[in-house]
Image: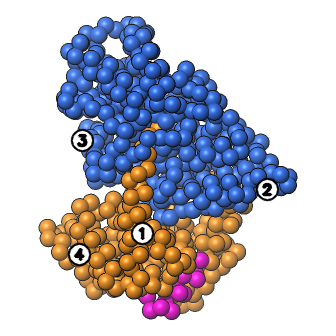
Amino acid sequence: GAPALAQQGTGIHRGWGELLPGTSGSSPLSPPPCFFPRLGFLPGHTARHHRACLLELLAEALREAGLRPCDVDCVAFTKGPGMGAPLAVVAAVARTVAQLWDKPLLGVNHCVGHIEMGRLVTGARDPIVLYVSGGNTQVIAYSQRRYRIFGETIDIAVGNCLDRFARVLKISNDPSPGYNIEQMAKKGQKLVELPYTVKGMDVSFSGILSHIEEVSHKMLASGECTPEDLCFSLQETVFAMLVEITERAMAHCGSQEVLIVGGVGCNLRLQEMMGIMCAERGAKLFATDERFCIDNGAMIAQAGWEMFRSGQVTALEDSWITQRYGMKVACEVLSAKAGKYQCCLLHAALVRPHQGSGV
Amino acid sequence: MAELGVPLSGSRLVQQGAEARLYRGRFLGRAVVAKLRFPKRYRHPALEERLSRRRTAQEARSLLRCRRAGISAPVVYFVDYVSNCIYLEDIVGSMTVRDYIISIQQREKDASGLFTLAEKIGEVLARMHDEDLIHGDLTTSNILLRPPAEKLDLVLIDFGLSFISGLPEDKGVDLYVLEKAFLSTHPNTETLFEALLKKYTAMSKKSSPVIKKLDEVRLRGRKRSMVG
């Protein structure tokens, strides 16, 4: 998957449980056509790709679901964060379609899309959410009527760490660096000692990366370890850190459910480790596969539908997009708690356009 | 025979934290809390061994360092490096700052009494940082109040992630971790935390580069991409 671009474009949603991904969900095995081996996603190319494909995709989604435009309840689009050019393309189409069909428009936060989709697919009710992707590493919990960020990375995201590690070792990004690391790690034997940095409920990955950049070539050249060993060691170390902060948040909040979302969330070793931790605490793990972990249109539709159900609408003049979310900018999101849908706030962190190839 | 894994016969499990299991019992006639770092099966055995040993040792060391500096912390009675279990003084009747804040907030509309508490926390952290001791996991659950709680006699606990460093960066991150834990656990306490930081700044001899770093670390968080 990739830096979020606009795989999640316009999602159309009609009724509970009937999702129409407005754009094709990318699976790690089938990179979308705008993906460049060795380069990842380029904003300009991606925007052109979206412009070329979006209308056809929209028609196809309707055809597949056997729906006419008048059957649609609302039109949701990604408001951000993400790369500007593709976001703008999708927003323009969403605005146009909403006005043509006379349907309400909903601007959706990408991160909230992940969480709401995860909840829908898994049936998790009140989970601690581990959101791990190329741009994000956060432990989020619903506490006192809001989603709150309890722990996060204090430097780079875990997916970004994996991507950059792959670049150091010249591991292919086709279909995705994270996927290739996962496959290589299965053949790893030796645990190489790497920095393990947990600060309360926060983690840090930049030290691991600079350590690997420094020692890997020497170790590989001397035959001290294999690239597979390094993949294995990296996964064992960073995932242990993630499971640890998730467990700490569970103990802190008294929660008995964990939901993993985001691109890195489809890594089976991460899921396995999280599962063991949950079993030891008598808790339940909810995880999804790459169809839902990786950015997709359905998740935007789902979050948009939840917002629509609670009576929210994004006015045309507010349907701008943003690459970043300011520190104080909070976006509205819904959460089913005790059977009742409530409006809550997710504090979104400020973002920077993504540079890595994402996971 | 003692139950398998229970550190003392007759002791009982009181809590399973993220780090360890806590047992209450008696050790040579004294009330103790035994903190057992049980192996985490999700971690690679070699990694698990390394972490548990390091954290057990570090916890014992930092508790001693605190007490030597006159900062209130539980007495270490015994450390078992084979099972990674620390036997600590049980602060009988204590409550966590977290529970105290929540109870005051529920009981009273006016939480101004909490400002003195915030200042006390700022003061004790300033002293700890001046000793170059970084706690590593500051939350309101990791600070206890000796009974009676109203006296605001603070006891620092849970030093498993602690380390020694004089770097403003490490101290700044320590405060950042507390800030996030504080504000996410206790909503609408921004002014309270400000009072804590103000006292910290006033009390610590080396506070100005630390506060500067804290601002920098906060900014790092803001710049982080939310993409993908």
Reply above or below: A323 against A280. above
Quick check: can you spot residue B94? no
Reply above or below: B102 against A109. below
The CA distance from mark 1 to mark 2 is 34 Å
Q: Which colour denotes chain B?
A: orange
Q: What residue lies at 50% left-to-right and 82% top-to-bottom? A: B132
Reply above or below: A174 against B183. above
| Kind of residue indicated by mark 1 | Lys
Can you identify the residue that label 1 sits on? Answer: B213
Question: Residue A218, which numbered label?
Answer: 2
The CA distance from mark 4 to mark 3 is 30 Å
| Kind of residue indicated by mark 4 | Leu
Question: Residue A214, which numbered label?
Answer: none
Label 1: few (<14), some (14–19) or many (≥20) C-alpha neighbours in 10 Å: many
The CA distance from mark 3 to mark 2 is 53 Å
The CA distance from mark 1 to mark 3 is 35 Å
Quarter of the image where one finds residue A82: top left
Quarter of the image where one finds residue A103: top left
Q: Are the residues under badges 4 and 1 in a single subunit?
A: yes
Label 4: few (<14), some (14–19) or many (≥20) C-alpha neighbours in 10 Å: some
